[in-house]
Image (cartoon, rainbow, N blue to C red):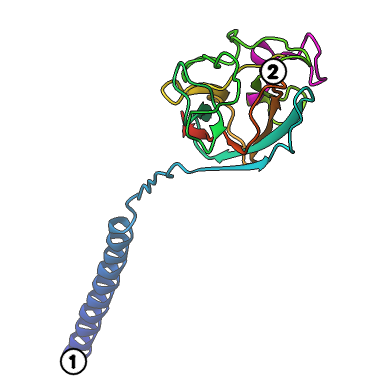
Amino acid sequence: MFKHIGTSIKEDIHLLGAALFVTLLVFSGLYATYAYGEAVNLTVTVSSTLSFTTSTNQFAALTPGTPRQATTTLSVTTNNANGWNVTLSCDDRTLTVACGSIGGLNVTELPDATGWIVAAATATTSAGNAVAITSGNDFLYFRMMSASGSVPFRSTAWWGTSDAMFNGSQLWAGIASSTNASRIGNAGAGSYSVSAHLNTVQYYLDVSSGQQTGDYEAPLTYTATAN
């Protein structure tokens, strides 16, 4: 009888120990799950990029009294949230020297109209100093086309509303000096686009019968800058 009771007590102690061990394992597992459940916050900054290219169609040989046209196509792409702006200047022009000369030496020059005077920070909705011209104007002019390309370049306040030659609604200006690079296009905040912004710059040139023959150069600089 006493032998049977002793065996039962040993079995109960064994079962109690096993239950305690299982309980410890359960609590240990819960603690491990909590310890590895902390949150992680990832941050990153996307860098700003800007791509700018130009492609120019040159003037054909010029006969005095017969105007010629040439073009430059501009392409701007950026991921900058505040957009970009483009300025234009003539490398060999000061405030008193024309843009364009034989060999770029500023000795025998092309006639150039009053330079485009619009500060780099000026909005495209502000009026500029471009004017209407006629076929008898013996000057070098430029303008941004009104009907083609991207909206940031199409400023009717600056270039008028028509691309038809010698139309009163088509405005032209001389090219700004190298000391006064002037804004010709702007894409401000909210203008982000995955596609390139495109537009065409038109040039007009005519000279009088007294213009010296030769090969003339008019070096221009277009600059695209992120806002």
Question: Of tags 2 and 1, which is closer to the observer?
Answer: 2
x%, y% of residue 57? 70, 41
Three-letter residue code for mark 2? Asp
For this rendering, which residue is in front, 142 or 103?
Answer: 103
Question: Is 208 placed left or right of 102 in the picture?
Answer: right
Residue under numbered circle 1? 3
Residue under numbered circle 2? 138
Q: Identify the image quadrant of residue 158.
A: top right
Dominant secondary structure, magenta: loop
Work out how far the residue at label 2 is from the one at label 1, CA to CA, in angstroms. 130 Å
The residues colored magenta run: 153-170
Q: Identify the image quadrant of residue 33.
A: bottom left
Is 121 within the magenta? Answer: no
Q: Dot 2: what SS?
A: loop
Question: Is 149 placed left or right of 114 in the picture?
Answer: right
For this rendering, which residue is in front, 214 or 130?
Answer: 214
Residue at screen point 36% across, 47% down: 41
Vertical position of residue 209 compared to residue 132: above or below: below
For this rendering, which residue is in front, 51 or 11?
Answer: 51
x%, y% of residue 27? 28, 63
Dot 1, how many residues are within 10 Å of its Cα: few (below 14), some (14-19), or many (20+)?
Answer: few
Q: Identify the image quadrant of residue 144.
A: top right
Q: Quadrant of the N terminus?
A: bottom left
Who comes first in sequence, dot 2 or dot 1? 1
Vertical position of residue 46 compared to residue 65: above or below: below
